[in-house]
Amino acid sequence: MSDDAVYLEKRGPVGHLVLNRPEKHNALRFSDLDDLVDLLHEAEADDEIRVIILRGNGKSFCAGHDYNDALRSYGLEVQADGSKPRRPSQRSRLIRDRRLGEGYKAFHFSLKPVIAQIHGVCTGAGMYLAEMVDLVICSENARFSHAEQRFGLAGNTWHLNTQILLYGPKRAREILLLGDTFDGKEAHALGLANRSVPEAELEATAADWASRVAQHPRDALVTGKAMWQMALESLGGSEQFARGYVGHTLGTNLRFEEDEFNFLKERKAHGTRDAFHERDTYYDK
């Protein structure tokens, strides 16, 4: 097994994009997502690969962004002497967020079919990837959530068009505003997952679906994806990412009032793990 945070593994006509930070539930640093996109392009260019499985090692698929890395990348980490850093410029944030949006867009418009094989925790960036790939097969006991607004942020901005089409407008707003956790069975009922199976059957089911997709001619798969992308474009497929990165910069740069839960303040006082617990206790009370 590779020591890299993400890696590409070839099994005949199936390429496996693997998230490999099991000790962090495969939380992605910004550099990890950049590397994952590079590997996706490598799989797209490899003529032996016809279909891609996206999966995670360890107990979870993906627990979102590595929160500590995000704070450092955005220049928000408190200094060693306890002083606050200078607030980063909007231009530096927009540059970073545009790159992030391009990474998500790469999966939305992959040239080859991508199947997400999901177990354990799937939240944040993990949810984004699940919502944007072609097919999702999950374990019945997987745990999904859009908890962005529980951080005091404005919620997902990257691919709202896709979410409205996937869940319907009212259900999409419910998922984003409440941030509730739901399991694989409900993910199937919502339309996020194509199939929900016992965890012991997850790998075999994903492999079976990938082998069936891989039976199609290469040109047919790529041409079919190209036509799918044209349909997505007519529904705002690219425009949502252009809007999304600006929205992310604005929506993660908010002022907290005294009577509001401030995750950053709690994290500074009690540490990241306890701050997560306090966040969910506050919103679920």
Image: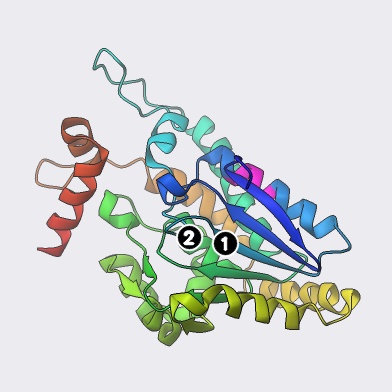
Q: Which residues are magenta?
A: 33-37
Q: Is residue 34 magenta?
A: yes
Coloured how?
rainbow
In the rendered view, does 6 fall on the left or right side of 264? right
* Most foreground residue, 136 or 240: 136
Q: Which mark is residue 61?
A: 2
Q: Residue at x 47, y 82 (%)?
A: 196
Three-letter amino acid code at disc 1?
Arg
Q: Position of residue 112 (x, y in %)?
A: 76, 68
Q: Residue at x 44, y 35 (%)?
A: 69
Residue 68 image offset from top left, x and y in percent = 38, 35
- SS category of the residue bearing label 2: loop
In the image, taking residue 127 as reference, residue 9 lies left or right, namely right
- Residue behind mark 1: 55
Q: In the image, is 151 to the left or to the right of 248?
A: left
Name above or below for residue 8 compared with residue 136.
above
Q: Are marks 1 and 2 in contact (CB under 8 Å)?
A: yes
Question: Which comes sooner in the sequence, label 1 or label 2?
Answer: 1
Work out which residue is located at the far bottom of the displayed protein and give it. 189
- Residue 97 in magenta? no
Type of amino acid under label 2: Phe
Local secondary structure at mark 1: strand
Which residue corresponds to the image point at 39% horizontal and 83% vertical from the top-left?
185
- Where does the C terminus fall, quadrant-wise? bottom left
Q: Position of residue 150 (x, y in %)?
A: 26, 55
Q: Residue at x 72, y 46 (%)?
A: 38
